[in-house]
Image (cartoon, rainbow, N blue to C red):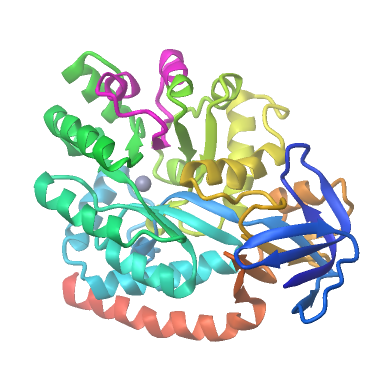
Amino acid sequence: MILKNCKYIVTQNKNREILENFDILIKGNKIERIEKDINLENEETFDCSDKIIFPGLTNAHTHIAMTIFRGFYDDHELFDWLSKINPLENKLTYDLVSVGAKIAIMEMLSKGIVAFIDTYYFPEATLEVSQKYGIRLVSGRVLVDDLKTRMAENDVLIKKQNELYKVVADPYAIYANSTENLKLIREYAKKRNLRINMHAAETRQEVFECYKKNGKYVIEYLDSLGLLDNAILAHCGWVTKNEILILSKRNATVVHNPISNMKLATGAFFPYSAYKSLNVSIALGKDGAASNNSLNLFDEMKVMALLNKNNHWDASIINAHEVLDSATLNGAKATGFDNGSIEEGKLADLFAISETSLEMQPLTKENLVSNLVYSYNSPVEFTMINGKIVYKREFLEEWTQKAKVLSQRIKQFFEKNL
Ligand SMILES: [Zn+2]
């Protein structure tokens, strides 16, 4: 397949080049060539002369089936909010998680997301829907309570790994497991060669209780248990300088969730400049749709920039291109999929927007990344994953109808359980 005469290609390569009027040749699931005037007989060709091509985005921390709870019990204090949501979550079924996952995946694909790291009940349901829609997923069975059973269930997921799916070891958070269990999870992860994915240092209460119990802050505690090598850690807003140093040494990825943190008022000052100065990789996540409430990364990118500028009293502390790096390259580092940039040999995971989008005007090569981060928030033209176009703008009407029908099942769930 050839994406012909792309108006602009935001490559995200080492030099962050933006190419003008280039072609992209895709063979199988990879980008084979990026050149001007590629002409091959019998090759399917898409005219992209009015399109801007970006590397696909990664939603690096999420609970996508929580679309079920979108708009339910908003505007309440965190623990009050949890006390309303948790009893309902205990009544979820495989089918309902599938419903929530479908609505979420349609939304994510329509906004250029090509991969996500998920933590939720019935991971098989989210996996099944992901494979059907062709989106990349990293997940695992949440390893809590009866660890032996949960690990056996995680082993079943490991057998389902393929080019679109990777498994992690997910202890959820330090407060969900005893020290003994966290050690068992470390041994299990080592044996299966799995990375750790979990929440960490999200709230002040978590930090306070960890220090009281263990005499260590959350990241220090996790490090003392040997859980941090290449780990994926969501939030990490409540950390000390020493903890940031540890994260840097362990090559961990921190997943920043600015909208969720602000909406639930977890109050953390995300230490962006300290992370940046120690080269800690910062990816970007949506968290659940109950605490956000959107599942697109366009608004998240904008808020990431705004929050950190505001927190640091410094408008130059973060720029639009660094934010895009978080949603692309650093997201790819978090998942381990070889995407996140448009370069020869990389996976063909990308999305296109129209150069005629109102929100992008006036458009120049120089301002287009800035316009994407600070202004764009519409559905994209198409999303490609693994060399296949999995979403086109023409799908929107049908998908919206589908989401409306699926929403009836959510309504019935609330009628029965509230
Ligand atoms: Zn979360």
Q: Is residue 187 left or right of residue 316?
A: left
Q: Quadrant of residue 220?
A: top left
The residue that appears at 46% across and 55% down in the rendered structure is 116
124 over 145 or under it: above or below: below
Percent coordinates x, y for residue 172 in the rendering: 27, 42
Q: Is residue 339 highlighted in magenta?
A: no
Highlighted range, magenta: 218-246
Q: In which quarter of the image is residue 290?
A: bottom left
77 over 138 or under it: above or below: above
Of residue 204 and residue 27, the one placed in the foreground of this image is 27
- Pick the quarter of the image with the N terminus: bottom right
One can see residue 21 in this view: yes
| Numbered circles on residues, count | 0
- Pick the quarter of the image with the C terminus: bottom left
Q: Is residue 219 highlighted in magenta?
A: yes
The residue that appears at 71% across and 35% down in the rendered structure is 319
The residue that appears at 26% across and 22% down in the rendered structure is 208
One can see residue 362 in this view: no
Percent coordinates x, y for residue 10 in the rendering: 76, 51
Percent coordinates x, y for residue 51 in the rendering: 80, 66
Q: In this view, does 321 lie to the left or right of 246?
A: right
135 over 261 or under it: above or below: below
Percent coordinates x, y for residue 224 in the rendering: 27, 18
